[in-house]
Amino acid sequence: MDQLLPKPRGKLSEKRALNDLTWLRVGGPADYLFQPADIEDLQHFMKELPADVVIFPMGVGSNLIVRDGGLRAVVIRLGRGFNGISVEGNTVTAGAAALDAHVARKAADAGVDLTFLRTIPGSIGGAVRMNAGCYGSYTADVLRKATIVTRQGEVLDLTPEDLNFRYRQSDLPDGAVLISATFEGSSGDPEELHARMAAQLQKRDETQPTKDRSAGSTFRNPAGFSSTGRADDVHDLKAWKVIDDAGMRGASLGGAQMSPKHSNFLINTGTATAADLEGLGEEVRKKVYETSGITLEWEIMRIGDPLKE
């Protein structure tokens, strides 16, 4: 394949292992990993890349299982040059590689309320793609514009209507790489916003296995909405509740485990393979269906090939 690939100014690595780039620390190699130097480098690479070469844009791997056999694609991972954050009035523009938590903090410093992003693991590119949300707020509520580089190397702006946001989903064009997003938050007192985020972090640490190797929520809530964090929240159709009812809290397979602290968190206890993690997830889905008739949908993305026997 290397004879077909354009020569970028950024870093292009062949047979690059992806396990150290995901929060779950599993997975085989990608055919290539491309880390563009800047937008123009990304544009050139996308434009010159043969149309039959598959690309996979990858953020910080916070919501991802790469299977043990690796990925037959060019993985594009944005880094420096794509992580800037600027604030003008109530408008916040962030590069796709900027971490959600950093965006929330910088917005709060300027008196802009994007506090829901503070406890969401990952980067802005993933937040837009997955319409990330918590505490009853979603990326779709505050997004005003998303900027992409198309497979043809063009820079385009997309509206929320173009993205067609749904629960944990959006419609990015095939092969496009999201490079930045612009948000508009409501005004707030910086001290109050930071205090709210500190309380959210404390609650998260008390209820979620933040010290373990996980990828956040494993399955989407069957009811199709995030936990609000309020005392009057209804739990009947939350993923953790139906997993508990199926007796799968703490269940394990190899080095994979459904966290005893929060049963919708799939964790790598230290020796898990991607097959362990995905296999345990499928066991949970089967058991939940048997006990409740509910088919859980994965929130964690699984990509690549299983390891050949």
Image: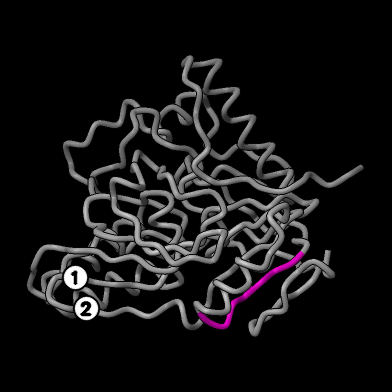
Q: Which residue is label 2 attached to?
A: 87
Is 269 in front, or is 306?
306
Amino acid type at image mark 1:
Thr
Residue 109 x/y as whole percent: 19, 80
Q: Residue at x 75, y 69 (%)?
A: 5
Magenta includes 146? no
Q: Give the Cα distance between marks 2 and 1.
A: 6 Å
Q: Quadrant of the N terminus?
A: bottom right
- Residue 216 in percent (x, y) is at 47, 52
**Dot 2: what SS?**
strand
Marks 2,1: beta carbons within 8 A: yes
Residue type marked 2: Val
Left/right placement of residue 208 relative to residue 93 reads right
Q: Residue 136, image x and y in percent?
A: 23, 45
Read off the residue under disc 1: 91
In the rendered view, tell whether residue 168 sits above or below residue 110: above
> Residue 8, relative to residue 238: is it above or below?
below
Observer-nearest of 275 and 269: 275
Residue 237 image position (x, y, % from top left) = 35, 27
**Magenta residues, start to end:** 32-38
Mark 1 element type: strand
